[in-house]
Image (cartoon, coloured by chain):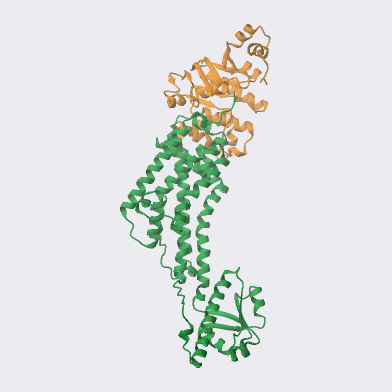
Amino acid sequence: MWRPITAVAGKELREIVRDRRSLGSALFYAAWGPCVMAIALAAIARNRAGDTSLTLTVQGHTSAPALMSFLRERSVTIVPHETAAQRVRAHERPVALVVAADYPNAFEQARPARVTVVYDASWSESGSQAARVRTLLTEYGRRVGDTRLILRGVSPAAATPLRVDDQDLSTSASRAAMALATLPIFVLLATFIGGMGVASDLTAGERERNSLEALLLNPVSRAAIIGGKWLATTTVALVTLLLTLGVSIAVLRHPRIQSIDLPVGLSPADAAAMWWVLVPLALCASALQVLVALRTRSYKEAQTQLSLLVFLPMVPGFLFAFSAIAQDSWLRWLPVTGHQLLLSDVLRGVLVAGADVVAVTVATVATTAFALWYATTLLGRENIVRRTGG
Amino acid sequence: MIALQGIRKTYGKTVAVESVTFTAADGVVTGLLGPNGAGKTTALRVLGGIVRPDSGTAHVDSHDVQRDPRKARALLGMLPESVGLYDHLTVREHLVYAGALHGLHGPDLMARAKALLQQLGLDSLTERRAGQLSLGQRRRVALARTLVHDPPNVVLDEPTNGLDVLSAREVRREIRRLAERGCAVVLSSHVMPEVASVCDRIVILSKGTVVSEGTPADILALASAPTLEEAFVQLIGTDEGLN
């Protein structure tokens, strides 16, 4: 039984390795997922300085010396410029402040003195910095207003029936954790995407090239043929998974990412734990892909249906993200959802319950066995070979 | 020996073959002759265990193809109409793969592959990938793959389809060599000169049934025709589907 399985798997793997374009597509994903995460983390690292300091281009700063002093006290670096708005328009600065020419007179006469915050709402960095400037200006205005009321013998509290304070507790680390939460999804996807092209080529592709009939004429069981193709698909899926984890470790160890005080990390030991957790899922995904591809009529249809199958591991991620479903214990026993929750546990350093691992593994192996049995049955059907000839 | 007994196969309401019975004896080349759509490929797929007949039996030596498919296939070398090679495998790797699926391995398999490649004039192409071969070369590689386990029974479906004159000639020579070595050979074709020059016996299929069977001389006599092509046209009642 094993000899034909290894013969089929060996031949398939040899072909996969030689078909560099297909192999390249499969392995491209391994780098793509973690790189997307790296870009998000790098952006957070870049903005990290913004947590404490802000550089503000100001037009007409000499008209509002007290305001400038207030801003400097709040760690704002003032950069005087006579055409501040143009600098924002040219994307040279994310935000600017324009002090109106009549500011001193209005201020002196206790009339509303006009300042304009210039920003570009389509530029996310500009929007967030403008919000900070606006908060500081509101605080300054309230302080000046309170002083004026006190000088007139009125308690500022009487003019402020409601006082709303914002308290943003987010830090660069917690924002990074949000980006890092995508890692389990990328890793889960690797088990499905890695073998996708291979599965369609080894089944629907084989039929389309008319080599399936010649294969079925050999004195080997249908189960051995399916076993060999499944083994080859699983091997590519596991290699893709391994590379995804490897690239993820490399990304998270980059000095720029390390500058963020990440609340969670991915050590080689964590990656190894994740790999072992996902081995049964890779076996299951490959079996499902072989089955789905075998049921299709053409290579093109196989690729379409397998692309839809890739959405399967994304569904629980979205549902968890939007809290559409509670992370109940029974979800820990299902393939995909159970694996995603286990991965999150590993990533957060939570002790993984042995019973959960056993339950999800049993369910996954059972699904794999069913898919392989069904695929073997399909291969035994005579319409699996396209009808030709007389 | 290859034997089909009362084979009937339908696809929906279409009857592909009806009560097809014939025997291909050892050391004899049996031609399966018929126009397109006569049921030749269906009959051969029943033999290969790819298609399950509605009724009737197919045997390869003493093994029932349906009841004992793996043993029957082990004694059969079958070349389907479509060669179905793998573009990224070399000629040698095709033979090694087919041999491995027949349980062969090690030096014996290598020696057998080398001898076959030499025999079929493929020794200079051993390390060339199938994707780089001409149609004739691909068909010869497929034939070598069919014969790698030295089967005592050989079924060839249109083996010279698309081959140039010289390649077709070489394949026909190889078919005769197989029969001389004692193989039971079934050759499916609709090329009259080929059948006339290679086959010892002829089975003519038309519309899914056997309309005539015998030696080429028997067929000519039965139809009172000067050539096999004339005899064939008379026996099937039309020249539709002939090359």
- Report the residue at 57% width, 75% height from top: A130
Give the quadrant of the C terminus of chain A.
Answer: top right
Judge from the rendering whether residue A379 lies leftward or rightward of residue A331; answer left or right.
right
- Residue A364 visible in the current orientation: yes
Residue B116: percent from the left, percent from the top?
A: 54, 29
Q: Is residue A280 above or below residue B190?
A: below
Q: Quadrant of residue A65?
A: bottom right
Chain A: drawing colour: green
- Residue B201 visible in the current orientation: no
Residue A62: percent from the left, percent from the top?
A: 62, 89
Residue B190: percent from the left, percent from the top?
A: 63, 20
Chain B: drawing colour: orange
Q: Is residue A173 above or below residue A195?
A: below
Judge from the rendering whether residue A223 lies leftward or rightward of residue B225; answer left or right.
left
Q: Nearer the viewer, residue B147 or B68?
A: B68
Q: Is residue A210 above or below residue A342?
A: above
Give the quadrant of the N terminus of chain A.
Answer: top left
